[in-house]
Amino acid sequence: MISVSWYAFNITRDFFDPLYPGI
């Protein structure tokens, strides 16, 4: 479950923070 949440958070962060791709 945590992995899914972290993965979703990573994608959301990529959309909101295009300045930090890959992080």
Image (cartoon, grey):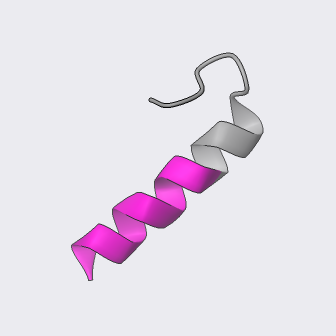
20 to 12, vertically: above or below: above
Seen at 27% across and 83% down, the residue is 1
Seen at 58% across and 20% down, the residue is 20
Report the predominant secondary structure element of the magenta stretch.
Answer: helix
6 to 17, vertically: above or below: below
Seen at 37% across and 75% down, the residue is 4
1 with respect to 6 (left or right): left
Magenta-drawn stretch contains 22 = no
Which corner quadrant holds the C terminus?
top left
Q: Position of residue 7 (x, y in %)?
A: 43, 62
Q: Based on the displayed image, in which of its 4 quarters is residue 13 positioned?
A: top right
Q: Position of residue 19 (x, y in %)?
A: 69, 16
Q: Based on the displayed image, in which of its 4 quarters is residue 15 positioned?
A: top right
Seen at 73% across and 26% down, the residue is 18
Farthest residue, direction left: 2
Q: Position of residue 12 (x, y in %)?
A: 64, 52
17 with respect to 3 (left or right): right
Farthest residue, direction top: 19
Q: Please tell me how many numbered marks the rendered image carries.
A: 0
Farthest residue, direction front: 22
13 to 5, vertically: above or below: above
Which residues are drawn in magenta? Answer: 1-11
15 to 9, vertically: above or below: above
